[in-house]
Image: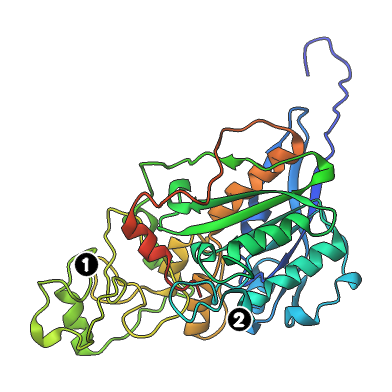
Amino acid sequence: MELGETTKQVVEKAEAIHSVAELFCGAGGMALGFKRARICDSDGVPHRFAIVWANDADHWACETYRRNIGAHVIECPVEKLDFRSLPDVEGLLFGFPCNDFSVVGDRLGLSGYFGGLYVHAVRCIEEKNPLWFVAENVPGLRSAKGRKGTALSAVLEDLSKVGRGYELTAHLFRFEDYGVPQIRHRIIIVGFRRDTGLAFRVPAPTHLGRPVTVEEALVGVEQVPHNNEKPRHSAKVVELLKHIPEGANCWHPAVPDALRLNVVGCRISLIYRRLARNAPAYTVTGNGGGGTHMYHYAEPRALTNRERARLQTFPDNFIFYGPKEAVRSQIGGAVPPLGAQVIAEAILKTIAGMPYTDVQASICEPPRHQLKFEFAALPCS
């Protein structure tokens, strides 16, 4: 209180809370990023998101979500959701399953079971008419099968016309350029309902040319008690890994002939690839057999699930539930929370009419580094 002042009225600004729902929520990577997003507008009013309901069909992913994000998750196939019975929301998030769009696999596109699940997001938008939405998928969406062209062109057409119509911004996000210690490229489509008069702008990268390295990301990880069991390997696998330099795979010239894999015509870069400590990790994946578990740069072993979670930017107090392989799937299939938060804060600024530094949206430009694209094109879950 200033000298001579007897009373002072303090007026607190009301908080603006924006309601959100999510389909295909998985363990909650996207949800966590949106929960963490905070801004204050030019009038000093704080803005944040509140997730009202979410849905996924995977039991262990829902259990992880329930214990870390909230009890509002609905565990059932998306086909069984009655959207009319659920609360209306301002925004809808959906990272629809990528299995049929990955460059590895049958490439069924929208005709596959998983590819076809995205129509339920369209159904939800049609029913609820949210003010905006965020869709996420792999770069393979650009070349997978669509109705008359690519899956991406069909998805963009549908999302543009659904409900009252949406102004779309589609961009290939390179999450390593935003502080995620991993080369992870994903197509993000943000749509604002046309009657809002708003349009999303792609936030400018924060770590262009200076990515967070694996070594930086894993500092102190050995002290984390949860989801951190070290894997066991056969003596032959341990010996193989000892001969593979950082950043190389099992076909490196340093590997003795007796330890080489006897796979004709196969040189997939991910197989028994060790991380390089002074670079971001290659893409964390959710599934895959022997040789695809990501391998430590200093120790002859695969990563623990907690180490994978660090590379995905999950905090150490975020505990995953289920068997080890189910946890691996949850981690690899998630949107990195840090990447989601960047997008969420840009959406809040768009809603609040606040300026921010942006870059031109583009999903068509060729990748700057072919090696990065190869990693990102592997299955996401």
Q: Residue at 10%, 72% (x, y): give it.
A: 254
Mark 2 or 1, closer to the camera: 2
Secondary structure, mark 2, is loop
Regarding residue 72, the answer to whether it shows in the image is yes
Q: Is residue 282 left or right of residue 74?
A: left
Q: Which mark is residue 112?
A: 2
Where is residue 164 shown, x and y percent of the image?
85, 53
Task: Tell which circle, 2 or 1, labels the residue nearer the N-terminal end.
Answer: 2
Q: Amino acid at mark 1?
A: Ala
Residue 264 in picture, x, y percent from top left: 22, 86
Give the position of the N terminus as an image quadrant.
top right
Determine the image quadrant of residue 321: bottom right
Residue 31 in view (yes/no): no
Q: In x, y percent, where is residue 92? A: 75, 59
Instruction: Measure the C-alpha gap from mark 2 to mark 1.
Output: 34 Å
* Amino acid residing under circle 2: Gly
Q: Position of residue 249 (x, y in %)?
A: 23, 72
Up-down: is 178 above or below 124? above
Q: Residues within 10 Å of mark 2 (few under 14, many from 20)?
A: some
Disc number at residue 191?
A: none
Q: Secondary structure at mark 1?
A: loop
CB of mark 2 within 8 Å of CB of mark 1? no
Is residue 204 placed above or below 274 in the rendered structure?
above
Front residue of 235 and 54: 54
- Judging by the rendered image, the residue that carries numbered circle 1 is 248
The residue nearer to you, when weighing 151 against 200, is: 151
Residue at image coords 40%, 66%? 223
Counting the numbered discs, the total is 2
